[in-house]
Image (cartoon, rainbow, N blue to C red):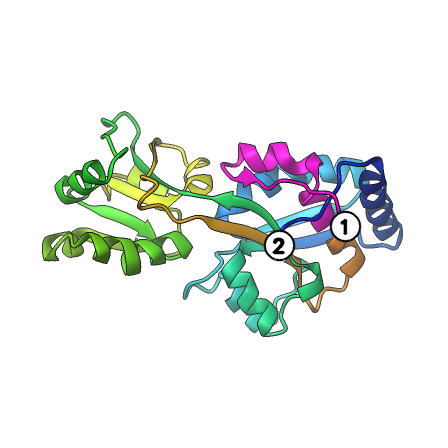
């Protein structure tokens, strides 16, 4: 879904009015469930948004998918209260289909691409070509990848397609419940793969770069209002803000690629 948003004062005024109206109605705090890939963006936006509109954002880390109790679908399934979800677009579509998220509020916010990291100070191998990536994968002692969108793609599609062999399979591990970068920083994996926006905030690692275009898979990060939200107007106003030009710098700073804003 592309964002149909014009660069006009009318849009900015609309966002400000809807947020202000929500705040005046008593909706002072919004609970936001955010996956790691867009966490940097919402954390950068939060203090600015609160100061500008008087709406506090309580941001909770919640993977887009997976078996961990903190994952967005699992939180909502057990009845946790939330107002906004920010997560992988394909996983959000499942929530919409299940009636957990409001279809009319759904909006795409930024594109993410898979990158590789090593422990801080370690040599950065060349992964600019498919052959370079293959060599690095085969020569590394331990490989880590996430249990979210990028990791599922790597383990189910890319790695099998590259036919890396049984030795590689034995040393490649899916990491649940924590950032892949943290595992690399501790030295428990020589290299790690995750969305660039999820690797950027992690201390103790160096980002080598994006994997080659031939191996790459874009992941769209999106947002929606939780169907059972008690603060629907304020939640929608936050999404409108995140999808506006005002949030582009935060989206880009986080490691995501902002989407173009086209006139309706």
In the depicted view, which residue is nearer to us: 260 or 248?
260
**Residue assigned mark 2:** 223
The image quadrant that residue 131 belongs to is top left
Query: Can residue 33 be seen here?
Result: no
Residue 24 on image: x %, y % = 89, 50
Residue at 47% across / 44% down in the picture? Answer: 112
Report whether 43 appears left or right of 68.
right
Residue 144 on image: x %, y % = 27, 48
- Numbered circle sitting on residue 115: none
Query: Can residue 94 be seen here?
Result: yes
Task: Please provide the residue range marked out in magenta.
Answer: 237-264
Q: Residues within 10 Å of mark 2 (few under 14, many from 20)?
A: many
Helix or strand or loop: what does disc 2 sit on?
Answer: strand
Pointer 1 and pointer 2: residues touching (CB < 8 Å)? no
Q: Quadrant of the N terminus?
A: bottom right
Residue 246 on image: x %, y % = 70, 35
Report whether 109 appears left or right of 119.
right
Residue at 63% across / 51% down in the picture? Answer: 2
Q: Is residue 204 above or below residue 261?
A: above
Helix or strand or loop: what does disc 1 sit on?
Answer: helix
In the depicted view, which residue is nearer to us: 262 or 79?
262
Q: Is residue 149 above or below residue 53?
A: below
Q: Residues within 10 Å of mark 1 (few under 14, many from 20)?
A: many
- Distance of label 1 from label 2 (alpha carbons): 12 Å
């Amino acid at each position: 879904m592309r964002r149909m948003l014009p660069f006009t004062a009318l849009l900015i005024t609309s966002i400000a009015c809807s947020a202000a109206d929500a705040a005046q109605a008593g909706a002072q705090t919004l609970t936001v469930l955010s996956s790691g890939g867009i966490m940097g963006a919402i954390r950068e936006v939060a203090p600015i948004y609160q100061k500008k509109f008087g709406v506090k954002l309580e941001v909770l880390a919640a993977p887009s998918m997976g078996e961990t109790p903190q994952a967005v679908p699992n939180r909502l399934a057990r009845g946790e209260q939330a107002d906004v979800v920010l997560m992988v677009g394909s996983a959000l579509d499942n929530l919409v289909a299940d009636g957990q998220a409001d279809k009319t509020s759904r909006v795409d916010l930024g594109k993410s691409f898979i990158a590789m990291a090593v422990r801080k100070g370690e040599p950065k191998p060349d992964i600019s070509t498919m052959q370079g990536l293959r060599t690095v994968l085969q020569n590394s002692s331990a490989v880590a990848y996430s249990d979210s969108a990028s990791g599922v793609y790597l383990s189910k599609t890319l790695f099998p397609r590259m036919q890396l062999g049984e030795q590689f399979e034995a040393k490649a591990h899916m990491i649940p419940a924590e950032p892949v970068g943290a595992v690399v920083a501790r030295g428990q994996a020589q290299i790690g793969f995750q969305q660039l926006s999820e690797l950027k905030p992690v201390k103790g690692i160096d980002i080598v770069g994006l994997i080659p275009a031939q191996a790459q898979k874009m992941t769209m990060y999106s947002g929606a209002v939780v169907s059972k939200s008690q603060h629907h107007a304020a939640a929608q106003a936050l999404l409108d803000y995140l999808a506006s030009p005002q949030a582009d710098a935060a989206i880009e700073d986080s490691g995501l690629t902002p989407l173009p804003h086209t006139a309706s």
